[in-house]
Amino acid sequence: MIGLRPERLGSVVALGAHCDDIAIGAGGTLLTLCQSRPGLRVDALVLSGGGTDREDEERAALAAFCPGADLSVTVLKLRDGRFPAHWEEAKDALEDLRRRTDPDVILATRTDDAHQDHRGLAKLVPTTFRNHLTLGYEIVKWDGDLGRPSVYQPLSDEIAEEKVRLLQEHYASQRHRPWYDREAFLGLARIRGIEAAAKYAEAFFAKKLTLDLKG
């Protein structure tokens, strides 16, 4: 088992197609990282929700999910569900972010996600961040697109519970959704925990991974 140690991380980029994607897919990992690495640089870019109440939710939520981090959040105004028609704008935003940061790891959507916005963003990432470790997070949904991940971040009981609490606290606009509940989030984390020989975990998909085995 290969571990990516927090002391080797100085900068993280977190990407989402919609407000709440990052927190749902990688909120526990961000909590774990930021608690282990005070002052960690986190640059978050979200493609949609700008100028709405969703942006306010996102900014407050990411501040809570990244305690003690040097956090920057950008929320664009692309139309939800219409990402393919705004490819150029999204590409420009990623290029601008790349000019400002050289992250040690990227947390993003995954290329085989059933949602076209998630999938489109994931396919755009390697066109801009060509030599970076990118971990594609998963979001449970009615499409039934959960796959077989290859990367896991175990979560302590406290982190798993805190993730669920923060999701419920900060995203009031999503509470009415039938899948947006404690059982869904902890249930998936429990299944991924079993696969990672832990109680809870978040899982990721890595298309390409370069090892550095020097002493």
Image (cartoon, rainbow, N blue to C red):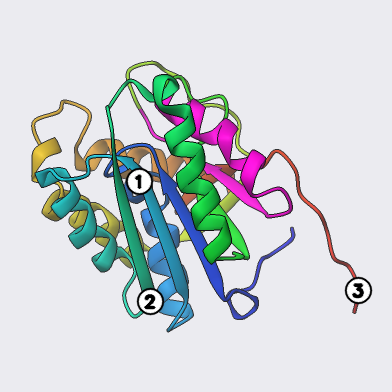
Which callout, 2 or 3, points to the residue nearer the camera?
2
Q: Amino acid at mark 3?
A: Lys
| Whole-percent x, y for residue 121 in the image | 49, 34
Quadrant of image for the C terminus: bottom right
From the viewer's perspective, tell me whether residue 87 is left or right of residue 126. left
SS label for mark 1: strand
The disc label shown at residue 46, or none: 1
* N-term mark: 2 or 3: 2
43 to the left or right of 153: left
Q: Amino acid at mark 2?
A: Ala
Q: Could you say where residue 2 lies in the image, as x and y percent from the top left?
A: 74, 61
The kind of secondary structure element at disc 3 is loop
What's drawn in magenta, residue-wise?
117-140
Dots 2, 1 in contact, CB < 8 A = no
Q: Quadrant of the N terminus?
A: bottom right
Residue 184 percent across, percent down from the top left = 28, 35
Examine the image and state in which quarter residue 181 appears.
top left
> How packed is label 1: few (under 14 Cα within 10 Å), some, or many (20 or more)?
many
- The residue wearing badge 3 is 214
Q: Nearer the viewer, mark 2 or mark 1?
A: 1
**Magenta highlight on residue 121:** yes
Earlier in the chain: of badge 1 and badge 3, it is: 1
Identify which amino acid the numbered label 1 is placed on.
Val
How far is the residue under mark 2 from the one under mark 1? 18 Å
Query: Is residue 149 or residue 39 the one in the foreground?
Result: 39
Q: Disc number at residue 69?
A: 2
- Which residue is at 36% across, 66% downward? 72
Please identify, in this view, whether the residue under mark 1 or under mark 3 is nearer the observer. 1
Mark 2: few, some, or many residues within 10 Å (few <14, many ≥20)?
A: many
**Which is more N-terminal, label 1 or label 2?**
1
In this orientation, which residue lies closer to the viewer: 197 or 134? 134
Residue 193 visible in the picture: no
